[in-house]
């Protein structure tokens, strides 16, 4: 097999890895609550185990990122995470007790925090700096397609078969995920001009400098405010539709989930190219700016069809965040190292913002009403956009001379461990 064929095969493997990983992760969405309800769990018990998963995911962001940084092989890190997520899916159906489900949530929470940074690290090791934005956009496209397909298939399985069939299917999808990962060849990858991990000799002073980096702190602040605006928005749309739309509420919510995914799949590669051409900050403003508009429109309009159209704006924001989050982390890691630890820090900011969003919006809704909650979420989105304008510096590095795209067969593989 020629080098170009090997590189093509590796990139195709990365496409399908993102697709199937998204399939696997979809099984841990709202299907958990539905399944546990059929197992006669109380609402309090379901809420407690879901809260456990959320807490584990937040607490695992930094340790999981540090672990992936420490591991020489990022492909092995991704494989272990996929295996743990598969095992957690099996626990749901084989041991639907409080201990079994709690263990599954803990395993899934930690493994998920490893998986996304590991895939991003593998991506960085495969493509040149100039192609990284578009490649991350392609990752987001395949992940979005995977989410949409999996939601439809798993919904059908849950409807026509036993509710636990969703988790059997989730576990089975671990196999094609691992096969796609195996297609990424460590000896035929494109060399990236970034060190994806520099963990072994870092001192406390190095880590202190990393976490005080102005770019990282500014982006984390922006992400916290963005998630405060975004996380609670669709759940509140669902509750309002359930009260007003009657039997068609489920169909409208399904459309509200699928429509943004279609937008993400359509525009993500363009977002990556735009970030490379115009800079990260301009594209961030586009994605963040869509959020206050969406919140304000939801506060003014509640008819089913317009709601679906308004929700498509979420596709713009989701595409921008999906592409720019790892891209900005890569920009910072270019100088500081510790790419996966940076991803973990940003992931922690995402979790904090989402937690505050649901709690604050719920409090506002119960005291003043849903419309006030939507306007409050829109205000948070506007603040996030203003923060990007005033606080967020441009992170795109200066253009460097191009390096050879493919490592020759006889060349030393100094960075081979990044994808081994």
Image (cartoon, rainbow, N blue to C red):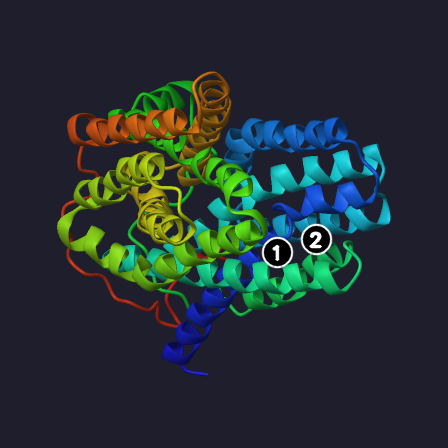
Disc 1 target residue = 24
- Residue at 69% of width from left, 39% of height from top? 107
- Residue at the extreme bottom of the image, as rendered: 1
Closer to us: 23 or 370: 370
- Residue at 34% of width from left, 44% of height from top? 321
Q: How far apart are labels 1 and 2 at the CA level?
A: 8 Å
- Seen in the picture, residue 118 relative to 407 is either above or below; the reply is above
Disc 2 target residue = 86
Residue 71 location, x and y as percent?
Answer: 55, 43
- Relative horizontal placement of residue 405, taking residue 124 as reference (left or right): left
Element type where label 2 sits in the image: helix
Closer to us: 207 or 394: 394
Q: Residues within 10 Å of mark 2 (few under 14, many from 20)?
A: many
- Residue at 62% of width from left, 37% of height from top? 110
- Seen in the picture, residue 50 relative to 304 is either above or below; the reply is above
Residues under numbered marks 1 and 2 in contact, where contact means CB atoms less than 8 Å apart: yes
Closer to us: 201 or 353: 353
Residue 298 location, x and y as percent?
Answer: 35, 39
Chain-order first, disc 1 or disc 2: 1
Element type where label 1 sits in the image: helix
Residue 125 visible in the picture: no
Residue 386 visible in the picture: yes
- Seen in the picture, residue 341 relative to 122 is either above or below; the reply is above
Q: Which mark is residue 213?
A: none
- Residue at 18% of width from left, 61% of height from top? 402
- Relative horizontal placement of residue 414, taking residue 417 as reference (left or right): left
Q: Residues within 10 Å of mark 1 (few under 14, many from 20)?
A: many
């Amino acid at each position: 097999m020629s080098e170009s064929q090997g590189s093509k095969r590796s990139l195709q493997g990365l496409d399908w890895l993102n697709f199937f990983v998204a399939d696997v992760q979809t099984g841990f969405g709202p299907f958990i609550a539905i399944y546990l309800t059929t197992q006669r769990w109380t609402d309090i018990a379901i809420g407690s185990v879901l809260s456990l998963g959320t807490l584990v995911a937040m607490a695992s962001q930094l340790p999981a990122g540090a672990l992936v940084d420490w591991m020489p092989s990022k492909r092995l890190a991704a494989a272990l995470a996929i295996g743990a997520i598969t095992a957690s899916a099996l626990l749901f159906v084989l041991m639907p007790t409080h201990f079994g489900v709690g263990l599954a949530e803990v395993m899934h929470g930690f493994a998920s925090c490893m998986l996304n940074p590991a895939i991003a690290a593998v991506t960085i090791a495969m493509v040149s700096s100039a192609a990284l934005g578009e490649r991350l956009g392609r990752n987001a496209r395949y992940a979005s397609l995977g989410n949409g397909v999996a939601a439809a298939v798993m919904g059908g399985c849950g409807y026509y078969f036993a509710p636990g069939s969703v988790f059997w299917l989730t576990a089975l999808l671990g196999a094609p995920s691992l096969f796609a990962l195996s297609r990424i060849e460590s000896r035929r990858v494109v060399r990236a001009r970034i060190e994806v991990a520099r963990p072994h000799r870092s001192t406390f002073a190095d880590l202190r400098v990393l976490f005080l980096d102005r770019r990282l702190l500014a982006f984390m602040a922006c992400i916290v405010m963005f998630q405060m605006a975004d996380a609670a928005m669709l759940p509140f749309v669902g509750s309002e539709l359930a009260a007003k739309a009657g039997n068609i509420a489920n169909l409208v919510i399904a459309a509200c989930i699928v429509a943004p995914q279609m937008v993400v799949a359509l525009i993500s590669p363009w977002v990556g190219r735009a970030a490379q051409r115009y800079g990260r900050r301009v594209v961030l403003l586009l994605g963040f700016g869509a959020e206050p508009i969406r919140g304000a429109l939801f506060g003014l309009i509640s008819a089913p069809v317009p709601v679906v159209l308004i929700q498509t704006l979420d596709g713009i924001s989701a595409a921008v965040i999906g592409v720019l989050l790892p891209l900005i982390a890569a920009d910072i890691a270019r100088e500081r190292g510790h790419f996966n630890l940076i991803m973990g820090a940003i992931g922690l900011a995402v979790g904090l913002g989402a937690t505050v969003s649901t709690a604050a919006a719920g409090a506002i809704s119960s005291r003043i009403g849903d419309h006030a909650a939507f306007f409050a979420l829109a205000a948070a989105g506007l603040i996030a956009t203003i923060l990007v304008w005033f606080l967020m510096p441009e992170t795109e590095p200066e253009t460097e001379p191009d390096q050879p795209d493919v490592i020759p067969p006889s060349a030393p593989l100094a960075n081979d461990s990044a994808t081994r």
